[in-house]
Image (cartoon, rainbow, N blue to C red):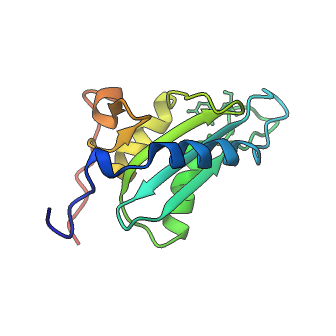
Amino acid sequence: MPDDAAPSNTAIDWAELRARAHEASRTAYAPYSNFHVGAAGLVDDGRIVTGCNVENASYGLTLCAECALVCDLHRGGGGRLVAVTVTDADGELLAPCGRCRQLLLEAGGPDCAVNENTTVAELLPGAFEFPLPQD
Ligand code: THU
């Protein structure tokens, strides 16, 4: 495998990602829904980024756990998400919401693995992709 290639699915420690997502759910601020969510992602340089949901009295401005995860990705130096797991407060897997599928597409691309058994491409078929200028 070339050095710049993403690790194969077998190189992804899903148990670790799930544990880190579960741990992140404990830091959620969700007094309105009382639904605590955590997300963890493996970056192509090997680091793990995490996020939790943060709600707001306006409801519509709620930040999903995946939003915080993508912020953590950029704050930690950027890179590409290879795999993402999302859980509730019991550590049970959750499907990312529609908005977050678009976020994950931009941060990980269509081949980014999600919750061990699917990919961003499968979760978001026919996705909108803006033609970013090449740098
Ligand atoms: N939530 C997430 O954090 N991620 C998702 O993909 C779906 C929903 C949060 C938002 C809100 O704080 C709570 O779950 C209930 O919808």
Residue at x-position 34% and y-position 36%: 120
Count of numbered circles on the image:
0
Q: Residue at x 70, y 30 (%)?
A: 90
Q: Which quadrant of the figure has residue 103?
A: top left
In the rendered view, does 24 fall on the left or right side of 4? right
Q: Where residue 67 sits: x, y (%)?
A: 56, 47
Q: Measured along the vertical axis of the image, is residue 89 above or below residue 110? A: above
Extreme-left residue of the structure: 2
Residue nearer the viewer, 53 or 102: 53
Residue at horizontal 27%, vertical 41%? 110
The image shows residue 36, relative to residue 51, as above or below, that is: above
Image position, residue 41 (x, y; %): 48, 51
Quarter assignment of residue 44: bottom left
In this rendering, the answer to whether 40 lies above or below 92 is below
Which image quarter holds the N terminus?
bottom left
Instruction: Tell me which residue sits at (56%, 52%) in the image.
Output: 69
Where's residue 135, x and y in %? 23, 72
The spot of residue 31 in percent (x, y) is 85, 34
The answer to which of 27 and 18 lies nearer the viewer is 18
Q: Quadrant of residue 53?
A: top right
Q: Nearer the viewer, residue 134 or 43?
A: 43
In this picture, residue 69 sits left or right of residue 46 = right
Q: Residue reaching furthest right?
A: 31
Q: Locate ligand 1 by image quadrant.
A: top right
Horizontally, is 104 left or right of 131 in the view?
Answer: right
